[in-house]
Image: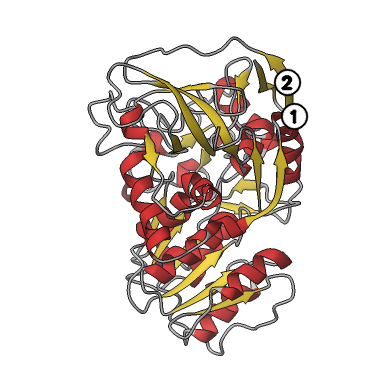
């Protein structure tokens, strides 16, 4: 059978593979019906950590059950099902409380990451009764396709932020996940939502969600002009963002109750921290922060090849006290010999050339560590129970995330093109039909 696989960093290709076999009694063999390339596929190809040779990509899929193991009781051959993009390893003893990272980090992100994904004629899925989901009666397959990853992820951002009735919410990034986060915030009772983005189709969909109960106002970060409220100290906006100024102005300097990071760049985190409320504010991140490969390579070299003479403090950097030049390079400004007893154990400060591929947390907006602001960094919730719950919410509230699909293709041969379309942002989401749902 034909499969679209990862051949190496930045390289994908179609190859021939053997048909998959049932590997365990709790597993199933599935035939993809509809798939949707994800920005996570783009990250895996061009930025991700090394994967096993010829890994088949693809984790957003509606599929037909072809064969079931003897321990699969809730799904039958021929049934069209939704496949959760996050598929926990339910054999791990702590999976029920640590579903995303039980056994090892990111263990729940299996298909298209550690086991073959959906961009092939058939694929294997373990723990079918807990990772597949029945599609609610009356729900379109396109709406269901958007639920397996996009809606689950957007709703995860909302739920981790604990959005409540009347909250002022900022959604940073209005790609498909940000749009789903707007949907979820409205369901949770948000009083007003500021959505940050610029692309025309995304703006149109976001603004269409506005109603009398909850205004959705789109902030174009490229054209927005707004100054910091009078009397606020300039460091309150660490990046000079007009969006931060606007939110602080509209909230009379208090800040938003919740900020959901669903897209953007490395400055999204400090901006979110700047504009979330002191004491009770929550920043909920579901965005992938891409690696700066040059910085990461330097970090790796320092950690594996760097040496430090712990007997000569003049050769060491004191990590907590650094400053950045205009190019973003860090330079230690306080030598280790000036450490005071209150600073703590000596070797917590002694490091060879400190270079970290990192995002920034502004000290001023964090109240020098005492602002009472909560930061959460989450992989999407997943598994059958969560996916069926989310799909039922979407169906029962007559919501249609299938509208996020702005381009469609047919045939496995078009999946590669769809991936490049996602890389270059030629669509919000893309659906590729690989098989007829009624055959």
Decide which of 244, 67 is in the foreground and name it.
67
- Does residue 432 sit above or below 232 in this rendering? above
Proximity of marks 2 and 1: CB atoms separated by less than 8 Å: yes
Residue reaching furthest to the front: 439
Residue visible at 66% across and 40% down in the picture: 432
Decide which of 392, 8 is in the foreground and name it.
392
Q: Which mark is residue 14?
A: 2
Foreground tag (2 vs 1): 1
**Relative to residue 99, is residue 63 drawn left or right?**
right
Decide which of 323, 55 is in the foreground and name it.
55
Q: Kindly identify which residue carries mark 1.
A: 413
- Does residue 231 sit above or below 312 in this rendering? below
Instruction: Inspect this view and state whether residue 130 appears.
Output: yes
- Does residue 67 sit above or below 393 in this rendering? above
Residue reaching furthest to the left: 93
Q: Which mark is residue 173?
A: none
Residue visible at 22% across and 26% down in the picture: 93
Instruction: Inspect this view and state whether residue 262 appears.
Output: no
How many C-alpha atoms fall within 10 Å of the one at disc 1: few (<14), some, or many (≥20)? some
Secondary element type, mark 1: helix
- Does residue 108 sit above or below 216 in this rendering? above
């Amino acid at each position: 059978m034909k499969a679209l696989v990862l051949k190496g960093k930045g390289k994908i290709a179609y190859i021939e593979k053997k048909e998959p076999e049932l590997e365990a009694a709790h597993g199933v063999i599935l035939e993809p019906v509809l798939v949707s390339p994800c920005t996570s596929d783009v990250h895996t190809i061009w930025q991700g950590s090394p994967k096993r040779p010829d890994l088949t990509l693809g984790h957003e899929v509606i599929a037909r059950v072809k064969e079931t193991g003897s321990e699969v009781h809730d799904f039958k051959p021929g049934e069209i099902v939704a496949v959760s993009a996050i598929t926990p390893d339910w054999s791990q003893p702590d999976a029920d409380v640590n579903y995303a990272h039980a056994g090892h980090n990111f263990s729940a992100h299996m298909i298209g990451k550690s086991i073959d994904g959906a961009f092939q004629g058939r694929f294997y899925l373990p723990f079918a009764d807990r990772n597949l989901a029945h599609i609610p009666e009356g729900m379109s397959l396109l709406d269901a396709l958007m639920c397996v990853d996009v809606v689950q992820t957007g709703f995860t951002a909302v739920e981790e932020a604990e959005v409540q009735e009347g909250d002022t919410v900022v959604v940073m990034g209005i790609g498909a996940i940000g749009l789903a986060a707007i949907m979820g915030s409205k369901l949770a009772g948000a009083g007003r939502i500021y959505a940050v983005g610029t692309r025309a189709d995304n703006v149109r969909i976001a603004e269409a969600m506005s109603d009398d109960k909850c205004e959705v106002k789109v902030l174009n970060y490229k054209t927005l002009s707004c100054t910091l409220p009078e009397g606020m100290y300039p460091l309150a906006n660490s990046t000079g963002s007009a969006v931060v100024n606007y939110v602080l102005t509209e909230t009379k300097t208090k800040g938003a109750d919740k900020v959901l990071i669903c897209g953007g760049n490395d400055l999204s985190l400090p901006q979110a921290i700047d504009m979330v409320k002191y004491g009770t504010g929550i920043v909920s991140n579901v965005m992938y922060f891409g690696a700066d490969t040059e910085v990461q390579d330097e970090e790796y070299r320092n950690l594996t090849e760097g040496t430090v003479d712990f007997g000569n403090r003049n050769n060491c950097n004191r990590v907590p006290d650094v400053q950045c030049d205009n190019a973003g390079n860090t330079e230690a400004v306080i030598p280790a010999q000036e450490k005071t007893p209150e600073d703590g154990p000596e070797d917590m400060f002694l490091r060879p050339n400190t270079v970290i591929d990192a995002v920034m947390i502004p000290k001023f907006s964090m109240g020098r560590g005492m602002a009472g602001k909560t930061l959460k960094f989450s992989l999407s919730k997943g598994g059958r129970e969560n996916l069926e719950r989310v799909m039922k919410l979407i169906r029962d509230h007559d919501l249609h995330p299938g509208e996020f699909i702005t381009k469609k293709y047919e045939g496995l041969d078009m999946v590669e093109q769809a991936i490049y379309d996602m890389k270059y942002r030629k669509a919000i989401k893309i659906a590729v039909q690989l098989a007829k749902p009624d055959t």
